[in-house]
Image: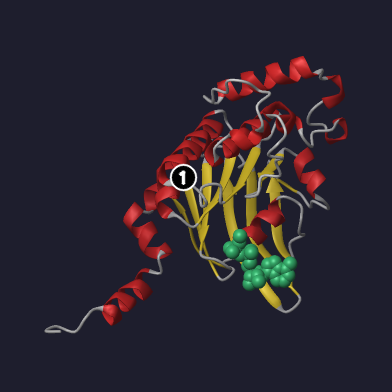
Amino acid sequence: MSEAGAPLLELRGIGKDFGSVIALDGISTTVRAGQVTCVLGDNGAGKSTLIKVLSGVHRPTRGELLLDGQPVAFGAPREALDAGIATVYQDLAMIPLMAIWRNFFLGSEPTTGWGPFRRFDSATAKEVTRRELAAMGIDIRDPDQPVGTLSGGERQSVAIARAVHFGARVLILDEPTSALGVKQAGVVLRYIAQARDRGLGVVFITHNPHHAHPVGDRFLLLNRGRSMGDFAKGELSREELTGMMAGGDELTELAEELERPAGR
Ligand SMILES: Nc1ncnc2c1ncn2[C@@H]1O[C@H](COP(=O)(O)OP(=O)(O)O)[C@@H](O)[C@H]1O
Ligand SMILES: [Mg+2]
């Protein structure tokens, strides 16, 4: 939890326009090694756009992105990957009928500088898969079983273990828990904590304050492309976070409106 030294990743006044649409404006936060920065916001808040700026899909229209204290401008996702910024998208880019170990090595061709794929024979690949998953506390019986036989939480976990194995320093997760039930979400939250404990800087996107608060060190709140604040954990209770996220005032008003008038 050290605050010393340059953050792994720093955003300074990041903005992104799509034509006349201002998708993001004035967004600042930090991502430190061994910490989790949560990005919270309702649909359309700009969460995915922010990820795409960090992962090299979009160039920011305004602002600065710093990696290890140095300004960076990614021209393509590959450049962000090569810098150690790995993004796990919600759809996971996994092939359900393919074996777990094949999915584990998918997309890690030698040109990425991530995984010397060609040097892996399948026996080694299976062993690495089993070992890396075990290190994350995931026990798979057989690396040959299709990824489709895993639960949603386990699949997210395989994607996280894969990013850790291939040398990610920053791990970006786009709503990894939102399609999951309570128990499976808990599984994924544990792996987020594991990645954090292995020293990665994690960017965890969610709209659920109950998922964010237990695991987060920082909380960036987005609303319609603007920042509603960038808080350290100690600055914000779970109740305050929930209130800000739920549009607390709007919900209170709605509750009053929906209340039956007394005596009816
Ligand atoms: N490629 C794009 N072109 C035009 N508008 C976009 C594009 N991507 C996102 N937007 C707009 O930016 C805003 C934020 O969207 P998004 O980042 O997807 O929000 P979130 O992920 O928080 O739901 C929305 O108003 C959306 O319509
Ligand atoms: Mg989104």
Q: Is residue 180 left or right of residue 65?
A: left
Q: Is residue 186 above or below residue 42?
A: above
Residue drawn at x 46%, y 43% as measured from the top left: 185
Query: On the image, numbered disc 1 is attached to which residue?
Result: 216
Q: Tell me which residue sits at (83%, 26%) in the image.
A: 117
- Which quadrant would residue 255 be assigned to in this image? bottom left
* Position of residue 176 measured from the top left corner of the image (x, y, whole percent): 56, 47
- Taking 21 as reference, is 154 above or below it? above
Q: Secondary structure at mark 1?
A: loop
Is residue 96 depicted above or below 119 in this figure? below
Q: Among all residues in the image, which is located at the extreme left?
A: 263
On the image, the x and y values in percent for residue 11 come to 64, 54
Q: Position of residue 132 (x, y in %)?
A: 63, 23
Q: How many marks?
A: 1
Residue 107 vs 224, above or below: the answer is above
Report the side of 62 relative to 28 (left or right): right
Image position, residue 256 (x, y; %): 26, 79
At x 52%, y 42%, the residue is 36
